Amino acid sequence: MQIKVSLVEDNLPVATELEKWIAGTHGLTCVGAYSSAEEALRLMPQTPSDIALVDLRLPGMSGVELIRRLKISCPNTQCLVLTMYAETDLIFDALKAGACGYLLKRIKPAEIADAIRQVHAGGSVMTPRIARRVLAMLTSQPASKVSLTEDPRLTDREKDVLQCMADGKARKNIVDSLDINSHTLDYVIRCIYRKLHVQSAAAAVSMAVREGIVSPGKPSV
């Protein structure tokens, strides 16, 4: 099965190289390349993709706002940030908007391919530098204003799923390790998102780690 990938990148040479690399990578196919967020919002719904590689510093609308809007217009497309920027505010803004991972452009193409496959399988990925920064930020921040003690309590099953997500397990591995079916897993994840007021696995794990509900997992990339 081919994983359909779209690109949102305003740097033409970078976009061209990414398109060539995806075309030559087994199991991946590029179904669209867009030079701005506005273009992506207009055209991407007509050619749906499984994964969108999104740069954050785009002309006009930002990549963060694009991710937020794509969660509505293309709900089945998972957004994976691929950028050269590692500012903490950008990282958290992207995760809160719904990004399923955060990669820096300096990583090797093979690592990008692995990240795409992991996100497509239901996981969340970050380059080690970003993962360390997120964990450092979580341990230094005070508890979130949206405390889990103020929300309906997470069930043991929801905590188990969250821990699997924090460990970077793919959907199939979560289903197998917890002995549940995929429909149950989808329901549990929806409940987690609703209770934590988040829109992505990465944001859910970040909040759960910050609140001490789960322990930090090892970076997947």
Image (cartoon, grey):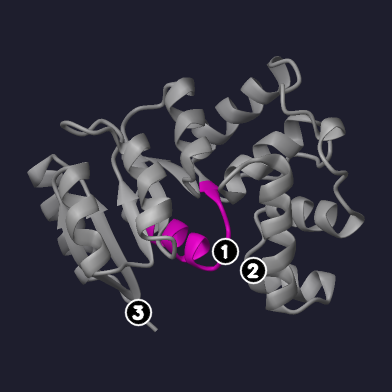
Residue 145: quadrant of the picture: top right
The residues bearing labels 3 and 1 have C-alpha atoms spaced at a distance of 16 Å
Crowd around label 2: few <14 · some 14–19 · many ≥20 (10 Å)? many
| Residue 94 or residue 134, whichever sits in front | 94
| Residue 148 or residue 104, whichever sits in front | 148
Q: Earlier in the sequence, mark 2 or mark 1?
A: 1
Residue 185, above or below 164: below
The residues bearing labels 2 and 1 have C-alpha atoms spaced at a distance of 5 Å
Q: Amino acid at mark 2?
A: Arg
Q: Which element type, helix, strand or loop, lies under badge 3?
A: loop
Q: Main secondary structure of the magenta part?
A: helix
Report the magenta residues as a range.
112-125
| Residue marked by disc 2 | 171
Crowd around label 1: few <14 · some 14–19 · many ≥20 (10 Å)? some
Q: Amino acid at mark 1?
A: Gly
| Residue marked by disc 1 | 122
